[in-house]
Amino acid sequence: MAVTGHTKTRLYRVWRDMKNRCMNPNNAGYVNYGGRGITVYKDWLSFLPFREWAINNGYSDDLFIDREDNSLGYCPTNCRFVTRQVQQANRRSFKNSSSTYLGVHCTPNKTWTTRVRVNGIDKYLGTFKTELEAAEARDSFSKEHNLPLKLNLGA
């Protein structure tokens, strides 16, 4: 099936970029996607099946594709369309993180700091004696301000 008339749409760019991140070793994002095993659902290798799924699952030009579980690939059961704020909150922890908690880091003097990102701006919440105190502070701030962040300690 031809994609004539779709190649200049934002949805087409979303699809093209998703495939490039996962399948093109020359893509700047490949190391964080295809390079670590993130794949694209076989039916979505063609644009029209992806487009049909997207339209039926809430796509609009002001939303972004998001994988609910960042260790899994792009597929109908793991993807959704969300705001930029939700997408930024759904980030994986990096291997070089100094903490087991999201947004918590150990300082050179062995205290713990925490931050949240709100509308693309980092807000530092303070320095704490323990890693757990920092995680609790981050969760508390997130709940108080109704931020769509993953919590460290659950509900």
Image (cartoon, rainbow, N blue to C red):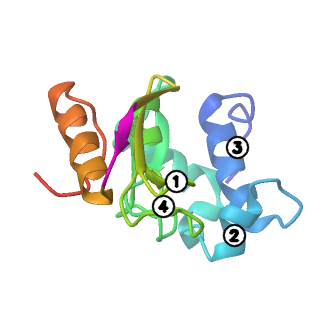
Q: Which residue is mark 2?
A: 34
Distance between the alpha carbons at the discs numbered 3 and 1: 57 Å
* 99 over 148 or under it: above or below: below
Q: Is residue 67 visible?
A: yes
Residue bounds of the magenta highlight: 125-129
The amino acid on which the numbered mark 3 sits, given as a three-letter code, is: Val
The amino acid on which the numbered mark 1 sits, given as a three-letter code, is: Asn
- Dot 3 or dot 4, earlier in sequence: 3
Q: Which residue is mark 3?
A: 3
The image quarter in which residue 54 lies? top left
- Dot 2 or dot 1, earlier in sequence: 2
User: SS of the residue at dot 3?
Assistant: loop
- Dot 2 or dot 3, earlier in sequence: 3
Q: Which residue is mark 4?
A: 93
Residue closer to the observer: 121 or 7? 121
The amino acid on which the numbered mark 2 sits, given as a three-letter code, is: Gly
